Image: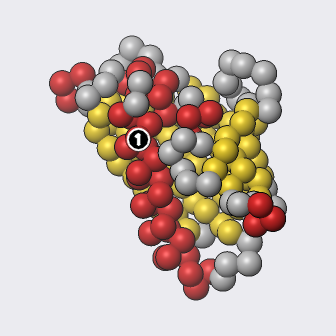
Amino acid sequence: MALFLVRRTAPLPPAEAWRRLTAWHRHGDTVPFTRVTVTTPPPTGEGTVVVARSGIGPLAFDDPMEVTVWQPPGDGTPGRCRLEKRGRVVTGWAEIEVRPGPGGRARVEWREDLRVALVPTALDGVVARTGRLVFGRAVNRLLRQA
């Protein structure tokens, strides 16, 4: 299990940070060699399926994920989304939490547990560090771009 956590505070209201982080199609713009599609009709909610296709040519693979928890932020209450990864290559889960922070800013936590097929558990630390780096940059970009 390669577990990692990304924390950010953004100069945005929680509802706007939530909107930016859960605009699934935008995730493909933030992760190299990745295209993201939503295979279920809008709006996003429990049961929504998001597929990230990563790689180049014959080395590409699908990372299908299903939204299993969908609780947008409300008046002072945090928002929470959980995605269960259901692919052959990547399994695990991701959780996004957005809560009110100081001065009307949004506090974001992105937790993820990645398991990559054919990668031995002895390399979980490397997978976690890589995940924290890649998804940390993705979160930064998603929060910066309207």
Q: Position of residue 50 (x, y in %)?
A: 71, 38
Helix, strand or loop at mark 1: helix
User: Badge 1: few (under 14), some or many (20 or more) residues near its Cα, within 10 Å?
Assistant: some
Q: Is residue 29 visible?
A: yes
Task: Identify the residue at the far front of this view.
Answer: 57
Q: Nearer the viewer, residue 135 or 70?
A: 135
Q: Is residue 95 above or below residue 74?
A: below
Q: Which residue is mark 1?
A: 141
Q: Count numbered badges in the picture.
A: 1
Position of residue 88 measured from the top left corner of the image (x, y, whole percent): 81, 62
Q: Mark 1 belongs to which amino acid?
A: Arg
The correct choice, above or below, for 64 with respect to 144 in the image is below
**Residue 11 drawn at (x, y percent):** 26, 29
Task: Write the residue at 62% across / 80% down.
Answer: 121
Question: Where 25 falls versus 51 (above or below)?
Answer: above
Residue 77 visible? The answer is: no
Q: Nearer the viewer, residue 11 or 29?
A: 29
- The colour scheme is secondary structure
Residue at the location (68% across, 18% down)? 43
Residue lying at 58% horizontally and 60% vertically, measured from the top left: 113
For residue 91, which quarter of the picture?
bottom right
Furthest residue in direction bottom, as rendered? 122
Residue 5, by quadrant, is: bottom left
Q: Residue furthest left?
A: 103
The quadrant of the rendering that contains the N terminus is bottom right
Locate residue 30 relative to residue 117 in the image: left or right: left
Quadrant the C terminus occupies: top left
In the image, 13: left or right of 41?
Answer: left
At x 71%, y 60%, the residue is: 56
Eyeballing the image, is 93 above or below 49? below
- x%, y% of residue 102? 20, 29
